[in-house]
Image (cartoon, rainbow, N blue to C red):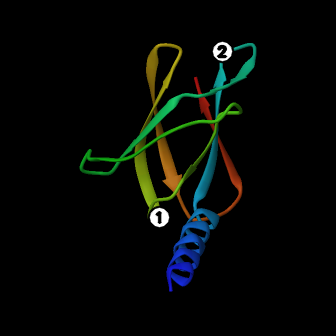
Amino acid sequence: MKRIVLLVLCLVTFVGIAHADQFQFLYWNGQKTYYVSYSNVRVYNANNEWIFNGYTDQYGGITINLSNGNYNCYVYYREKWWYVRLGIDGRRELKTIYLR
């Protein structure tokens, strides 16, 4: 019974991740593009409630599993909080977001 419960939990977790949106954050300084590596990402809903917190990987990538819609996002990079608007649509392709 424990194995069945564990299997169901694992499947639910992987199915949720499979349908999550994937983003890659890049920084453009006017001359060169940089990965926004190991940076804090915070997502807020329309009521300005904090609903997601995570960190990018070494290539600026992060997976965000939220309901479809538009969200306010803040990324901490180079000792500054950068604001971007994220659109969550449930598609699997990688979405590139530039900090400028």
User: Percent from the top left, x then y, of residue 50?
Assistant: 31, 45
The residue sitting at the bottom extreme is: 1
Q: Which residue is mark 1?
A: 68
Q: Which residue is mark 2?
A: 29
Question: Measured along the vertical axis of the image, is residue 36 above or below residue 44?
Answer: above
**In this rendering, position of residue 81 left or right of residue 93:** left
Question: Measured along the vertical axis of the image, is residue 40 above or below residue 7?
Answer: above
Q: Residue at x 69, y 14 (%)?
A: 30
Q: Are marks 1 and 2 in contact (CB under 8 Å)?
A: no
User: Percent from the top left, x then y, of residue 8?
Assistant: 54, 79
Q: Quadrant of residue 15?
A: bottom right
Q: Residue at x 26, y 44 (%)?
A: 48
The local secondary structure at tag 1 comes to loop
Question: Measured along the vertical axis of the image, is residue 55 above or below residue 46?
Answer: above
Is residue 37 or residue 48 the one in the foreground?
37
User: Percent from the top left, x then y, of residue 7?
Assistant: 58, 77
Is residue 23 or residue 58 the one in the foreground?
58
The local secondary structure at tag 2 comes to loop
**In this rendering, position of residue 54 left or right of residue 29:** left
**In this rendering, position of residue 16 left or right of residue 71:** right
Label 1 – label 2 distance at C-alpha = 31 Å
Q: Residue at x 43, y 54 (%)?
A: 70
The residue sitting at the right extreme is: 32
**In this rendering, position of residue 26 left or right of residue 67:** right
Circle 1: is it few (<14), some (14-19), or many (20+) Cα within 10 Å? few
Assign the C terminus to one quadrant of the image. Answer: top right
Q: Residue at x 63, y 51 (%)?
A: 22
The image's mark for residue 12 is none
Question: Which of the two discs, 1 and 2, labels the residue nearer the N terminus?
Answer: 2
Q: Amino acid at mark 1?
A: Asn
Q: Amino acid at mark 2?
A: Asn
